[in-house]
Amino acid sequence: MPCVAVVDTTFARVNMAEEAIKVLKRKVPAIKIKRYTVPGIKDIAVAVKRLFDEGCDAAITFGWVGPTQTDKYSYLAMSIALQMLQIQYGKHVIDVTVHEDEASGEKLKEVAIMRAREHALNLAILLTKGPEGLTPLAGTGQRQGWPDVGPL
Ligand code: RDL
Ligand code: RDL
Ligand code: RDL
């Protein structure tokens, strides 16, 4: 029974984790989910570490980055920490991030929900099919939240 760590924030303006959990439970019925909600993106990495130490096999995180340069620096700090965790533990951390300047209003909400669902599906495939699970989509210009751009 795979255990997935789901980490999200109160800073985010859309409940992305809720959408992703629905996809994960539908695609991997035996899944065990451990959810951990923190204030903001710079608090995500330690939550992932704690859930890995409790035995989770993979993580999916939901971050929301504000529009200022200060916010973008916070994202960079989080991103580097998540990369370090992946390498240290040899476990995937699927980083679902929405940048507040990608769109606005209802469109931004749609980007967030679609990105959460599509990355949850990516994780479900990695969990159930392993390293070659996504290979049929290799080189096909997949995007999450925005339309796929397709191959050249
Ligand atoms: O540990 C408390 C906070 O420092 C932490 O929650 C930060 O991630 C909060 N935060 C910022 O301080 C900031 O400048 C966040 C952002 N920007 C941001 O864009 N998104 C966040 N948190 O989720
Ligand atoms: O862990 C899930 C995603 O965070 C991860 O797959 C990222 O590498 C996806 N990604 C971005 O989030 C992004 O803003 C990619 C790019 N840009 C990019 O330019 N090329 C990618 N991925 O392959
Ligand atoms: O091609 C348009 C977008 O894909 C591009 O602007 C991406 O950089 C947007 N994006 C992020 O900013 C991000 O943090 C994406 C992701 N994460 C992601 O995980 N998947 C994306 N885009 O397709």
Image: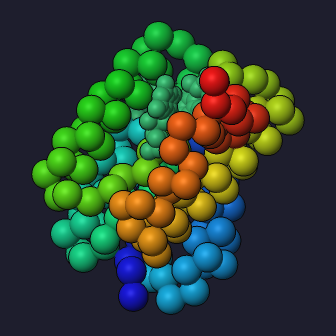
Residue sitting at x 68%, y 32%: 150
The foreground one among 146 and 43 is 146
Residue sitting at x 57%, y 49%: 137
Residue 1 in the image, given as x and y percentages of width and height = 39, 88
31 shown above or below 107: below
Residue 88 shown left or right of residue 147 in the figure: left
Residue 62 in the image, given as x and y percentages of width and height = 52, 48
Residue 80 shown left or right of residue 104 in the figure: left
Residue sitting at x 51%, y 66%: 125
Residue sitting at x 39%, y 80%: 2
Q: Quadrant of residue 23?
A: bottom right
Residue 11 in the image, given as x and y percentages of width and height = 55, 40
51 shown above or below 94: below
Q: How is the image coloured?
A: rainbow
Does any portion of residue 98 appear in the rendered image? Answer: no
99 shown above or below 91: above
Image quarter of the C terminus:
top right
Residue 146 shown left or right of residue 118 in the figure: right
What is the residue that sits farthest to the right in this orientation? 106
The foreground one among 139 and 32 is 139
Counting the numbered discs, the total is: 0
Does any portion of residue 56 appear in the rendered image? Answer: yes
Residue 33 in the image, given as x and y percentages of width and height = 46, 76
Q: Quadrant of residue 99?
A: top right
